[in-house]
Amino acid sequence: MNGRSTFFIFIAAVLGLAAGFILANSINRSELSTLRAENERLKTEKSAGPAGDAKFSLTEEEINATIAKADQSPGDFDLQRNVGIAIYRYGSGKQDEKLIRQAVQILDRAAGLRPDDYDVILSLANANFDVGYFSKDNDALAKARSFYSKALVAKPENVDVRTDLGLTYFLQNPPDFDGAVGEFKKALEKNPKHEKSLQFMV
């Protein structure tokens, strides 16, 4: 199987795991918005099971070939973004910290090419959050906090992002409860019934 075929199989498999449809190699913002909405719809309908997980499991060779493709074209923003997000989502679904760290490296390259791309900023926030959570890494949580803050400058009404920002304070060692509560309160000011914020406030 050549590198190009492996890349497309990888992208299709990752997005099938997340939402059941294929993300093209180059995708514009309006398509991303449409796919994101469809992804949320499919996630609510999808019933996870061992068969589905097996169907979209990837070999180490396929993953490495996809990462290598991104490494070979560091100046291609779309490639860095798409591969970085795909690797992050797959690694997160598998709770594979090593893969998530590799995704961070690819997403960092994408951010270097377009520092204000919202999808890259939020993916970097989430990926660093997961690394911090899985490995109890305060530095990773601090990086996640920085990216969440940047995402909130672009979209200050996003209470989910605000809550995740609060969780970076809650999960660090030692916890910064005042910092966490401050962010949860801001989220609840926007949406008093936001379940996740309410749970962590309690």
Image (tube, rainbow, N blue to C red):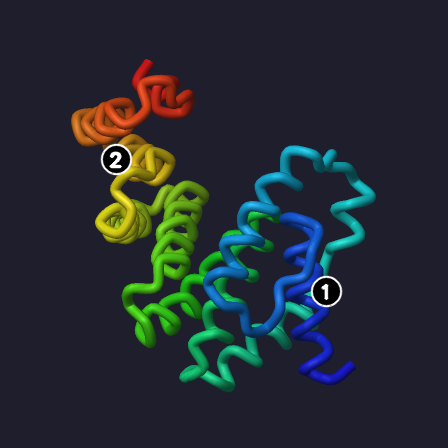
Residue 107 rendering spot, x and y as whole percentages: 41, 66
Seen as rendered, the residue at the extreme top is 202
User: What numbered label is drawn on residue 169?
Assistant: 2
Please name the residue shown 61% across and 74% down the image.
66
Position of residue 134 in the picture relative to residue 167 (left or right)? right
Q: Amino acid at mark 1?
A: Thr
Position of residue 169 in the picture relative to residue 57 (left or right)? left
Residue under circle 1? 59
Q: Is residue 9 above or below residue 136?
A: below
Residue 121 rendering spot, x and y as whole percentages: 34, 58
Please name the residue shown 47% across and 73% down the image.
80
Quadrant containing the C terminus is: top left
Q: Is residue 177 above or below residue 48?
A: above
Please name the residue shown 41% across and 58% down the image.
119
Q: CA distance from mark 1 to mark 2?
A: 36 Å
Q: Is residue 172 at least partly visible in the picture?
A: no
Q: Nearer the viewer, residue 172 or 128?
A: 128
Q: Residues within 10 Å of mark 1 (few under 14, many from 20)?
A: few
